[in-house]
Amino acid sequence: MFRLEIKGMKLEPDLQIVQADVKVEADGEIIIDESMCVDVGLPALLYSGFEPTMPNRWAEIGDWTSVPFFVCGCGDPECRAILFRTQVLEEEGEVEWVLVEQAEDRSYREQELYRFPLRSYREQVLRAAEQFLEVIDGQDYRPLMKDTEAVVRRLTDRLRRAVGTEH
C-alpha cells in the first residue's frame, strides 16, 4: 500500500519554492513525515509514474528526472534529500520504490524495497500535481528550473490520460 499525503502546500515567496507537510506511508510504515520542499522534485515524482528514476542529489537543475522527489524545506537537495530509485513494472501493474542513500562519490546503498499498485500510485501523484498547480496559479512563481510549471502540466496531462484509461 502506498499513501502520499501533502498538506499545507504553499509558495514561499522569498525562497521561490513550494513547501508542504509531506507524509509518505509504504506498507503501513511511515517513511516520511516532515515539512519539505515539494516543487523541486515534483517533476521527477510525476515522471516516476511512467519511467525509471535514479536520483542524484548533485544533479544539475536541468536534469530534473534525477532530482530527488523530496528535499529539505530550504529547497536544496544537497542539504537534505530522501532518495528513491523507482521502476514501473507494467506487467505486474506495480511501481517499485527502493530507498537509497547516496554517497558523495555518487554511489548508492540500497535500503528498503517497496512495491505499490501502479494505478493508486499514479492517482496519488496526480493529486499532488493538481494541488501544486492550484497553489501556483496566479502567483509570481519563479522557480530555479524555469520550466517547472510547463513540465508539471505536461506530466499531469499524461497522468490524467493514464488514470482515465486504466482498468
Image (cartoon, rainbow, N blue to C red):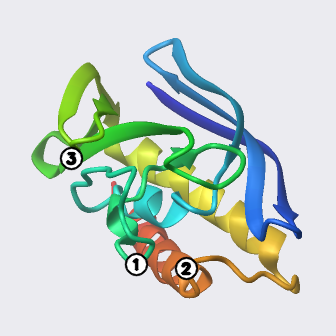
Give 135 or 18, whichever is nearer the viewer. Answer: 18
Residue designated by label 2: 145
Q: Earlier in the sequence, mark 3 or mark 2?
A: 3
Marks 3 & 2, CB-CB < 8 Å contact? no
Residue at x-position 43% and y-position 50%: 68
Residue occupying the point 61% across, 82% down:
149
Q: Look at the picture and state if 95 lies above or below 128.
A: above
Q: Which mark is residue 62?
A: 1
Residue at 21% over, 26% down: 109
Amino acid type, residue under disc 1 in the picture: Gly
Q: Quadrant of the C terminus?
A: bottom left
Give the class, few, some or many, for how many residues have Cα within 10 Å of label 3's Cα (few <14, many ≥20). some
Q: Position of residue 43 (x, y in %)?
A: 48, 67
* Left or right, 60 with reference to 10: left
- Considering every residue shown, the one lying at the far front of the view is 104
For this rendering, which residue is in front, 110 or 2?
Answer: 110
Q: Nearer the viewer, residue 40 or 134?
A: 40
- Residue 95 position, x and y percent, is 28, 42
